[in-house]
Image: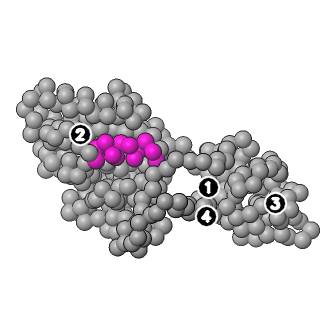
Amino acid sequence: SKEKFERSKPHVNVGTIGHVDHGKTTLTAALTRVCHEVWGTGSASAFDQIDNAPEERARGITIATSHVEYDSPTRHYAHVDCPGHADYVKNMITGAAQMDGAILVCSAADGPMPQTREHILLSRQVGVPFIVVFLNKADMVDDEELLELVEMEVRDLLSMYDFPGDDTPIVTGSALMALEGKDDNEMGTTAVKKLVEALDAYIPDPERAVDQPFLMPIEDVFSISGRGTVVTGRVERGIVKVGEEVEIVGIKDTVKTTCTGVEMFRKLLDEGRAGENVGVLLRGTKRDDVERGQVLCKPGSINPHTKFECEVYVLSKEEGGRHTPFFKGYRPQFYFRTTDVT
């Protein structure tokens, strides 16, 4: 019989990050195996299934990503694992897989390496809120002091990028042992079980989109004779109720207006909620006051900016990107939600 999809448990999005060959994919497979064995939840995914990551297209970029899921007694985890470094960069920058928390895998035998640092920096820049650490391959390190040294290095690195290094949970063990069902010195199954318990305890339940302040990127604007102006789009977060004040932000000066109606599939509703495609009727707003690319939001919840600092991923020639260099004075064009900005 098919397992019923558990809606009652909170869903948490996580992923493995860390340097190449430090054991991210082995740990991913071990997590599915241990949860299945210890709590009887989900099913175990084999290393080869995960390692052979399918390519996905997100915003026109090809990203190789593996998705697995596993359950602790209280939560359902959706977990992403990427094979290559460029896949992580693309995944995190496009937000193709937004993480509520990341599992940083660092080999105890090697210590932090360049991509360890780079993935922590990326996590900081794209706003991954929590990191939990798994010090892997600990069965290859006999010296207790060396383990402590690596742990200190990882904590310092986290603190350097504004993560709470001193308070970050660090679990030491061997993903391979856990995957093979071994548990010498509690380094296999027990360590991975501890890791899941650390995820449960340290990453808070994500705030659902519907509980956040209202925001809807405007995709289209219509004028309906006798009724006024309607803006359409997909509500990104929160709820808009008929009669509430809203703000139109971006491109021009911010203006306040009132939502006098919400429509979906030509039916009138009392409210529009996160995830729904709706039309919002705005009181006293002229057709020319609003344009695609602006956002409708809860008053005071968003400040527009004209300057920002960012990290960009430039597509290679093979990916359909440029084959000539950037020259001085180049003006890049950015795409934000529903519009281009130069």
Residue position marked by numbered label 3 in the rendering? 289
**How many neighbours does mark 1 have within 10 angstroms: few (below 14), some (14-19), or many (20 or more)?**
many
Which residue is drawn at the image coordinates 80% and 50% (left, top)? 255
CB atoms at circles 3 and 2 under 8 Å apart? no
- Of labels 1 and 3, earlier in sequence is 1
Question: In whole angstroms, how far apart are the C-alphas of marks 3 and 2?
Answer: 53 Å
Q: CA distance from mark 4 to mark 3?
A: 18 Å
If you read the primary sequence from the N terminus, does the residue marked by circle 3 or circle 2 appear first?
2
Q: Secondary structure at mark 2?
A: loop
Question: What range of the chain is rendered magenta?
Answer: 115-126
Please say if the residues under marks 1 and 4 sit with CB atoms less than 8 Å apart.
no
Whether label 4 touches label 3, CB < 8 Å: no
Q: Which residue is situated farthest in the right direction here?
A: 226
Q: Is residue 230 visible?
A: yes
| Residue at mark 1 to residue at mark 2: CA–CA distance | 37 Å
Residue 206, given in percent of the width and then of the height, sits at 50, 43
Task: Please state which amino acid type lies under the numbered disc 3.
Answer: Asp
Location of mark 1 (residue): 236
Q: Residues within 10 Å of mark 2 (few under 14, many from 20)?
A: many
What kind of colouring is applied to the model shown?
Answer: one colour
What amino acid type should be assigned to the residue bearing mark 2?
Pro
Q: Amino acid at mark 1?
A: Glu
Q: Residue at x 49, y 59 (%)?
A: 328
Q: Which residue is disc 4 drawn over?
A: 340
